[in-house]
Amino acid sequence: MDVTRRQLIAGAAVTVAGGGLALSTAGRAPAAPSDSTNYLVGCGIGDVTGAVAGQGMMGYSNPEQVAAGLLQRCWARAYIIVDQATGKRVVFLTADIACLFESHHMGLMEKLSKRFGSLYTEANVNLNAQHSHASCGGTAWDYAYSLAAFGFKKNSYDAEVDGMFAAIVRAHDNLAPGTITIGREELHNASANRSRVAFDANPASEKKLFPNAIDPQVTVLRLRHASGRDVGAITWFSTHGTSLADHNVLIAGDNKGYASYLWERTQPGFVAAFPQTNSGDMTPNLSLEWFTPSGPTTDNKRNCELIGERQYVAGRRAFEATRPMTRGGVDSITRYVDMSAVRVAGTYTPDGKPASTTPAMMGAAAAATSSEDNYEQPLPLLVEGMTNPLVAALGGDKKPPIAPWMRDMQAPKLILFPLGLMPPSGWIPSVVPLQIMRIGELVLVAVPAEVTVVAGLRLRQVVADELRVDIDNVLIQGYANSYTQYVTTPEEYDLQQYEGGETQYGRYTLPAYMQEFAKLAAAMASGRSLGRGPAPVDKSGFQPDLLPPVPADRPIPGHAYGDVLRQPGGSYRPGQPITVDFVGAHPNNDFRHGGTYLEVQRREGDSWTTVADDNDWSTEFRWARPPGSTDTSRITITWRPPAGASGTYRIKYDGNSRDGSGRIRQISGMSRTFEVR
């Protein structure tokens, strides 16, 4: 945060609630000199790539967006920090998926308990998603999220949970004495406010803290072993994972996955995560020309590259300029809260009057989707900004009418689906984990939702006040431990843009979070325990998959597995696409974790060296059924040689076929050689 913005916050004493809640940074407690910096640090990575073919994708909730290949693998990146003086430890994990569902949280906690006992639990483990909209769908136990993928996809779910578990195990095994330093930067050309009309409804005193209606703050933790080797970095920045639009059908980590790829490619063995903060109203699509199919590239790869590279460059700048933290040690606290039934004190509401949340309900604006981040509008009769006509007739279009029953029914939202009340046990979670995690001077407010920048400001402030720390040291960690859509300010909610329609628990969702996180922060400050809270609902029991089973494979008639249907030409220039088609099998027979679906090999004397695989940005792996077929597969591999590539190359396909008895065997194919000059 630059000096001007620091001064605005420090001197503001801005009133944001009728009950007198003020933004200020006065009276902060000095850092305790006894805080320990005697750390063990460990980093680990695990492959979470699920089904790359034939299953719905997650993020846009578009049933027509069905995976048909792989652009880049998706990864979980885990960091474990142990304070040797107190014995306290925390786990921080970011996954290249759209959302961290309660299904992931519950499934992973069970695996961690079996492996580590009480060492890693829901109290000290933070799981979050970097929010790629190019990831696998059907991995939630909540029907609101799985139905767009036509049910629960156990193969992708297991891949994601197993990959997260592997990342944590590797981080644990890599624990060694080390240090943690912090760096900050600002990034102004990798996000834009996609809901400016709602943002502008907030008080001027808050809007002036975000001059361009974005949160430009970049925060980096640098993890280094005592040997002097850098082992990891965590780079927080707010922008959506929607560079790859809803017509993309290749699995990938989107812009943040690309940023991680750039960093890790330059430092083998290094683990670089790019988690979200309060990105609810932040889009990476700075220009609609980048986003639509008529833009620079039909798959939006150029947009993804630009936004990912800008995050990487800003993260590296902050990384190289890190400093020791003013405080050491680690801490964490977690409590479950039923967000559908929180009675909110007037201290946290705009008008100073008590209020309450309600069971989750989806608004018309939510079903209309965000026009800035969705090229396809699935329900054109619904648009952002739609409010309940009855409420509008009673003068409630801008603020709720006085009648409590209307206010409690989420006015002025035009309700389409009462998700929290739908059988058998609600279609989105009601009881969710709220968590605060401290790593040295940095405090993470872990919210199971997408939080807008002004909503994030208010949450950060109440936590900063309770912990008596500077607000710059408090970040929202969105998409954490569960997922319940959006959190907007009450002022933003009234406009019923997409984000307001997706604020599930009503107009007072944010005030409820402010109140509950204030309690949590106060308990952390005093060392008290608030208890676990109500138990979350385990919905794992009945999880149907509505898609028919994938039939056994057979090769394209007249061919054998691995045959080349389209050979490369004789010579190419760097950047020119090289495409090879193979007779293959369904990729979901084996996700090839620890392996690859393809290799680009370069001749080195009498041998061949792999120079690219299916995790490289220069390659694309596509699967399709030939016309009229239901059980044969055509595999298309494309490679664009990078600048400077030169020599003799060939392209290899690796896959797995499954016969009628269920037996799986490896198959492969090899193209003829070609030159790159």
Image (cartoon, rainbow, N blue to C red):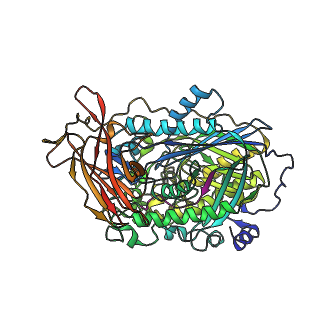
Q: Position of residue 353 (x, y in %)?
A: 64, 56
Give left or right: position of 56 versus 495.
left
Q: Residue furthest front?
A: 606
Give left or right: position of 386 versus 317.
left
Q: Is residue 618 above or below residue 1?
A: above
Give left or right: position of 226 versus 356.
right
Residue at figure coordinates x 22%, y 35% from the top left: 551
Please identify the quarter of the rendering in which residue 665 is found: top left
Answer yes or no: is residue 412 visible.
Answer: no
Residue at figure coordinates x 65%, y 37% from the top left: 123
Q: Quadrant of the C terminus?
A: bottom left
Residue at figure coordinates x 50%, y 47% from the top left: 484
Span colored in magenta: 232-243
Q: Position of residue 478 (x, y in %)?
A: 56, 52
Q: Which of the two residues, 104 or 397, is positioned nearer the viewer here?
A: 104
Answer yes or no: is residue 589 visible.
Answer: yes
Residue at figure coordinates x 22%, y 28% from the top left: 660
Q: Which of the two residues, 206 or 281, is positioned nearer the viewer here?
A: 281
Q: Is residue 676 above or below residue 345?
A: below
Q: Position of residue 367 (x, y in %)?
A: 37, 56
Q: Residue 486: within the magenta?
A: no
Give left or right: position of 371 versus 272.
left
Q: Quadrant of the N terminus?
A: bottom right
Q: Residue 239: within the magenta?
A: yes
Q: Which of the two residues, 121 or 167, is positioned nearer the viewer here?
A: 167
Please identify the quarter of the rendering in which residue 83 is found: top right
Q: Position of residue 340 (x, y in %)?
A: 53, 44
